[in-house]
Image (cartoon, rainbow, N blue to C red):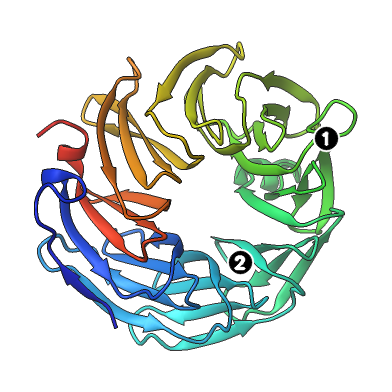
């Protein structure tokens, strides 16, 4: 069971650090926060997930979810339930209040890489070359998306337009999968059939690592080990643009309005104009390790770019001027972070959950 202590100033990030939550016995791979922002779940190399209170006055551990036999790679919240995906090839559904394991979902034959929840469905990807769709309540298998020739990694869900679906029987709910076979595929969820393959002669030359959509949901963004981000027309599979400039693997991307933000193993985060493909800015934090995640957030009237890195650090930059505002650190590589209710929560391979005062981290207080 976990415990919490308040960290002294000037230890990891001076006055920004509020709490260190301890409980995991090995590195933390993933995290998620419920819609209300009141509960945080973390998944670890130690095969467990832990539920934490996000109260800044009284944080602590709600309980430990024990049952997987290998590391947990992904977690997801939906309503009062938590889903965990593991290298033991199973997905488990847990009740947040009782901590009971309600379902053990089996069907994949290799490591679970990602899970997402959407309405009545759970979607998962795996090294077994497939993505799958499961019934949210029963865990029964509904669809197997076969077509990739190597492991499937990132997943993306795009809901269809209900008006078009009712009036014209068009614009289906779509699942997009990215794979180590250098392609992405869009699927009609209602039939399980592929709609478009994003790749081929002029596509990526290495594994796809991350996916994103523009605001309207018409343009697909794919990041790859080949150092590029590419955009595609979601509905016909045609390639739209190539973003070149990074000198390392693309690890994470986010689209905000007309801007694309990309993080890379070349230790930089870059900002691009979506429509012109032109680089507009570069966020350098004097790091020598790969970026693991990034988020662009708005606080008041200002925008900030937050990045996490394998060099143990989390950095905050001004969006407009790309200036470094603040840097705080774990005692090991940072794997993920979330922003919620006035705090930034980060996890890493020091086995800890760290809670940071958001406005101080942003340089506002």
The earlier-in-sequence mark between 2 and 1 is 2
Q: Residue at x 32, y 36 (%)?
A: 315
* Residue closest to the eye, 290 or 236: 290
- Badge 2 element: strand
Residue that badge 1 annotates:
199
Asked if labels 1 and 2 touch by Cβ distance under 8 angstroms, the answer is: no
Camera-near label (2 vs 1) is 1
The x, y position of residue 354, in whole percent, is: 26, 57
Q: Residue at x 31, y 75 (%)?
A: 23
Identify the residue at the far front of this view.
Answer: 288
The x, y position of residue 91, in whole percent, is: 60, 76
Name above or below for residue 244 compared with residue 353: above
Q: Mark 1 Cα within 10 Å, few/some/many (few <14, many 20+)? A: some
Residue that badge 2 annotates:
122
Residue 258 seen: no
Name above or below for residue 231 compared with residue 190: above
In this figure, what is the number of numbered marks?
2
Name above or below for residue 306 compared with residue 116: above
Q: Residue at x 80, y 41 (%)?
A: 182
Q: Residue at x 56, y 85 (%)?
A: 103
The quadrant of the image that shows the C terminus is top left
- Left or right of residue 33, residue 160 in this image: right
Question: Which of the 4 image quadrants contains residue 303?
Answer: top left
The x, y position of residue 252, in whole percent, is: 54, 39
């Amino acid at each position: 069971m976990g415990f919490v202590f308040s960290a002294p100033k000037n230890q990891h990030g001076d006055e920004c650090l509020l709490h260190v939550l301890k409980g995991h016995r090995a590195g933390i791979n993933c995290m998620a926060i419920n819609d209300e922002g009141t509960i945080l779940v973390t998944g670890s190399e130690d095969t467990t997930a832990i539920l934490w209170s996000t109260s800044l006055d009284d944080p602590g551990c709600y309980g430990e979810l024990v049952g997987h036999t290998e590391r947990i790679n992904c977690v997801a919240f939906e309503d009062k339930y938590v889903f965990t995906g593991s290298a033991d090839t199973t997905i488990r559904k847990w009740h947040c209040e009782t901590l009971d394991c309600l379902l053990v979902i089996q069907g994949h034959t290799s490591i679970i890489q990602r899970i997402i929840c959407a309405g009545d469905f759970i979607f998962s990807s795996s090294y077994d070359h497939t993505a799958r769709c499961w019934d949210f309540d029963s865990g029964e298998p509904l669809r197997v998306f076969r077509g990739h020739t190597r492991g499937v990694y990132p997943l993306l869900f795009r809901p269809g337009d209900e008006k078009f679906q009712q009036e014209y029987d068009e614009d289906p709910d779509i699942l997009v999968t990215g794979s180590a076979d250098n392609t992405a595929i869009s699927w009609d969820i209602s039939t399980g059939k592929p709609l478009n393959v994003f790749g081929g002669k002029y596509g990526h030359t290495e594994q796809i690592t991350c996916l994103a959509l523009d605001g309207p949901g018409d343009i697909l963004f794919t990041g790859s080990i080949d150092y590029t981000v590419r955009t595609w027309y979601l509905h016909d599979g045609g390639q739209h643009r190539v973003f070149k400039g990074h000198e390392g693997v693309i690890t994470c991307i986010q689209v905000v309005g007309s801007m694309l933000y990309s993080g890379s193993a070349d230790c930089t985060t870059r900002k691009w104009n979506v429509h012109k493909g032109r680089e507009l800015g570069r966020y350098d934090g004097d790091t020598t390790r790969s970026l693991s995640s990034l988020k662009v957030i708005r606080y008041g009237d200002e925008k900030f770019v937050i990045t996490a890195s394998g060099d143990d650090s989390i950095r905050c930059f001004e969006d407009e001027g790309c200036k470094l505002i603040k840097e705080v650190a774990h005692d090991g590589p940072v794997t993920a972070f979330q922003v919620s209710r006035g705090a930034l929560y980060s996890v890493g391979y020091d086995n800890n959950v760290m809670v940071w005062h958001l406005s101080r981290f942003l340089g506002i207080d």
